[in-house]
Amino acid sequence: MDLSHELAVALAAARTASEYVLAEYDAFAPIADAPADISTHVDRQAQELILGRIREAFPNDGIRAEESTPGASGTPHYAERVWIVDPIDGTRGFARKNGEFSVMIGFAIAGRVVLGVVAEPVVGRTTYATAGSGCWVVAGESEPVQCRVSRCGDLASATMVQSHTKIGSKPKPVVEAIRPAKVFETYSAGIKLAMVARGEVELYVNDYRNFHDWDACAGHILVEEAGGKMTLFDGGSVTYTGPVERRGLLATNGLLHEECVRRLMTI
């Protein structure tokens, strides 16, 4: 499957959106108590920039995006070919100005993700993948470098990434079940999944009872093309055919996956 044109469009769209988001970020007054569901004018305009590129190149494709903007209307949300977009994943990281947010662009055919781009504007890094072509990372103007997941096969030595928790709060049930050596916290599912793909951590557990397609799609293929695995808590497949009930998301280096599923099923 030749996805070179789709990838070029996705990378260009992510670059355009990242440049806009970064300029707005520099001028943005931080919101220290930004809630989890915060949305800003920057989310909406970044989405319009992305969707404009996609609709120009692929006018017959479906679009499923987080924000309700004009560019997201008038196209099917559930199509054979569908773009799944989160213009700023981790908006709390944007609003709090800690740099922990990403631009996520995914593309699925018949419910299977085949392309993903996760751009991190503040650090100037983009991690991307297409089906069968591996996962790659490019920082600044450097040449792309292929990513591979960690080869750690022992949970007692593994690092898990999760969303920020309140200072002083007790460990989440998922952490107590998995018992990793370390827990790293950051906003943005895109960043977390890219970290797994780049081998910087061994696993990511999202314990939300129901997550949206745009929370996972772009990062999903990064992990798989880097040699890892992503499923629901029970080991079931994550597909992108429409709204479905889900219970948690697990992404690992593959070597730890079965044991993580076994432990998660106990909670």
Image (spheres, helix red, strand yellow):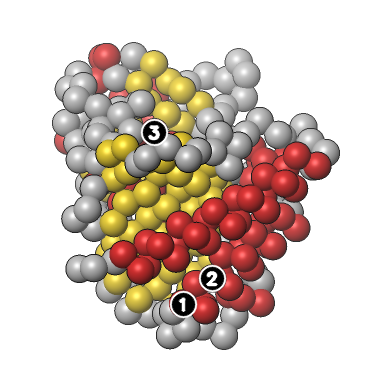
* 213 displayed left or right of 154: right
Spot occupied by residue 98 in the image (x, y as percentages of width and height) = 66, 30
Disc 3 packing (10 Å; few <14; some 14–19; many ≥20): many
Residue 57 is marked as: 1
Residue 53 is marked as: 2
Spot occupied by residue 94 in the image (x, y as percentages of width and height) = 67, 41
- Residue closer to the observer: 100 or 7: 7
In the depicted structure, whether residue 262 falls above or below residue 72: above
* 97 displayed left or right of 83: right
Q: What element carries label 1?
A: helix
Residue 265 seen in this snapshot:
no
- Residue closer to the observer: 83 or 125: 125
| 3 vs 2, front mark | 2
Q: Quadrant of residue 80?
A: bottom left
The CA distance from mark 1 to mark 2 is 6 Å
- Residue closer to the observer: 198 or 68: 198
Q: In which quarter of the image is residue 48?
A: bottom right
Amino acid type for the residue under numbered disc 3: Met
* Residue holding disc 3: 195
The CA distance from mark 1 to mark 3 is 30 Å
Q: Which residue is rendered at x = 60% and y = 37% of the image?
A: 122
**Are the residues tagged 1 and 2 within 8 Å (C-beta)?**
yes
Amino acid type for the residue under numbered disc 2: Arg
Q: In the picture, which quadrant includes the C terminus?
A: top left
- Residue closer to the observer: 2 or 151: 2
